Image (spheres, rainbow, N blue to C red):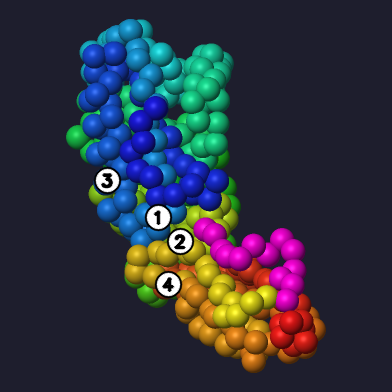
């Protein structure tokens, strides 16, 4: 396994693991290069750019006996063979024409055939990096293709990184396609809804800003009953940025998975008894870039500091008996307009200090 990007301890980061398929042993250095290029591109785009320090990226080199991916020419959405018919021996059985769609690159032509490869993927991850949060597979083929789902896949076509980032939007952040994917393939989610009332639609706080509106997926049939928030989001067109609604959902998911407090001192698992002074308290925060975290320090209910990482207390700051020091951390990112963000994604660190003036003089 190769470390592509290390921002901090795995237990408080989103760990993205990239697997190879269709790379022979002699091509695995190229796979690491491809994985590195993907990571570089990923963290040049918002909101990954701002929250880069919340992510680690690793690559697991899995050799295949042959290069490329299968193309059985069984797709029904194009006139086959669109590209040459091909059968290759790869570790995860990557194949185009998944579920009848030529560009659907998957680890099986259908669900039953994917079970063996899925078991292999799970086994490789369990043996090498069981603490992953999202795993995706880069396939050594220059033909355009990819898929989302549990383990997204992307070919190494010209716009390979854009494919992979789009698919990561599905698998890690539960975003839906903003092009019409077909009847029965949408559901209520972050960036898709049947609601059309601007006063209650889930992205009501963004309406009128940054191109956010209520846009039907189509003009007739089932497509006309579904709405998306933007006309030019990455979940519709490759090469475009994520729209404000998608970015908000992504940042909320980042906060679901990672605490902005990486560490703090002193330990708060037990009360601090009769301390010596000055008594220092410190937070180690994972700060977005630019930093949008806000911290409020209170001592016995009175604010004593804002947006500082270190607080130092003297004996004169404390009252006789039990004292409570609290730091409350929230993210005031302009990418967030969620009504309840500050109640759902708030981190609180509390210390209890027992102080006796008499004891401190002994």
Question: Are there few (<14), some (14-19), or many (20+) residues within 10 Å of tag 2?
Answer: many
Q: Which mark is residue 40?
A: 3
x then y, percent, for residue 54? 44, 54
Question: Are there few (<14), some (14-19), or many (20+) residues within 10 Å of tag 4?
Answer: some
Q: Which mark is residue 292?
A: 4
Q: Quadrant of the C terminus?
A: bottom right
> Which residue shows up at 49% across the image and 64% down it?
284
Query: Are the residues flagged by discs 1 and 2 in contact, CB closer than 8 Å?
Result: yes
| Dot 3: element | helix
x then y, percent, for residue 53? 40, 55
Instruction: Give the camera-side residue of 360 and 301.
Output: 360
Cα distance, mark 3 to mark 1?
13 Å
Tell me the residue that label 2 is attached to.
286
Verify whether residue 48 appears in magenta. no
> Which residue shows up at 71% across the image and 85% down it?
361
> Which residue shows up at 25% across the image and 32% down it?
34
Verify whether residue 267 appears in magenta. yes
Report the side of 236 relative to 134 (left or right).
Answer: left
Which contiguous range is marked in magenta?
Answer: 262-274
Q: Earlier in the sequence, mark 4 or mark 3?
A: 3
| Dot 1: element | helix
Tell me the residue that label 1 is attached to.
53
Q: Quadrant of residue 65?
A: top left
Report the side of 21 relative to 333 (left or right).
Answer: left
Q: Residue furthest left?
A: 158
Any part of residue 38 in sight = yes
Q: Earlier in the sequence, mark 1 or mark 2?
A: 1
């Amino acid at each position: 396994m190769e470390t592509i990007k290390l921002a901090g301890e795995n237990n408080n980061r989103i760990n993205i693991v990239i697997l190879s398929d269709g790379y022979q042993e002699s091509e695995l250095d190229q796979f690491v290069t491809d994985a590195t290029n993907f990571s570089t591109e990923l963290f040049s785009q918002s909101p990954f750019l701002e929250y880069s320090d919340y992510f680690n990226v690793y690559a697991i080199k899995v050799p295949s006996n042959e290069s490329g991916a299968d193309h059985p020419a069984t797709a029904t959405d194009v006139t086959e063979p669109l590209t040459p018919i091909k059968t290759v021996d790869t570790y995860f059985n990557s194949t185009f024409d998944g579920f009848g769609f030529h560009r659907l690159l998957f680890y099986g032509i259908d669900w039953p055939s994917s079970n063996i490869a899925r078991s292999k993927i799970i086994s490789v991850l369990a043996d090498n990096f069981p603490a992953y949060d999202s795993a995706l597979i880069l396939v050594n083929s220059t033909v355009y293709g990819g898929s989302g789902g549990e383990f997204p896949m992307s070919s190494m076509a010209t716009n390979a990184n854009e494919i992979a980032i789009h698919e990561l939007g599905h698998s890690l952040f539960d975003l839906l396609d903003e092009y019409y994917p077909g009847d029965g393939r949408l559901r209520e989610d972050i960036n898709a809804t049947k609601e059309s009332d601007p006063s209650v639609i889930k992205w009501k706080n963004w309406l009128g800003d940054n191109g956010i509106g209520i846009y039907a997926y189509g003009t007739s049939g089932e497509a006309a009953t579904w709405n998306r928030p933007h006309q030019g989001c990455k979940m519709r067109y490759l090469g475009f940025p994520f729209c404000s609604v998608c970015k908000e959902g992504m940042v909320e998911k980042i906060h679901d998975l990672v605490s902005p407090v990486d560490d703090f001192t002193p330990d708060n698992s037990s009360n601090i008894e009769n301390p010596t002074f000055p008594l220092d308290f410190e937070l180690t925060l994972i700060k977005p870039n630019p930093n949008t975290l806000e911290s409020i320090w209170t001592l016995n209910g009175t604010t004593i500091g804002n947006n500082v990482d270190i607080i130092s207390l003297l004996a004169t700051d404390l009252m006789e008996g039990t004292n409570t020091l609290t730091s409350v951390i929230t993210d005031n990112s302009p990418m967030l307009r969620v009504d309840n963000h500050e109640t759902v994604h708030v981190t609180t660190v509390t210390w209890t200090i027992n102080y006796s003036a008499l004891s401190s003089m002994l």
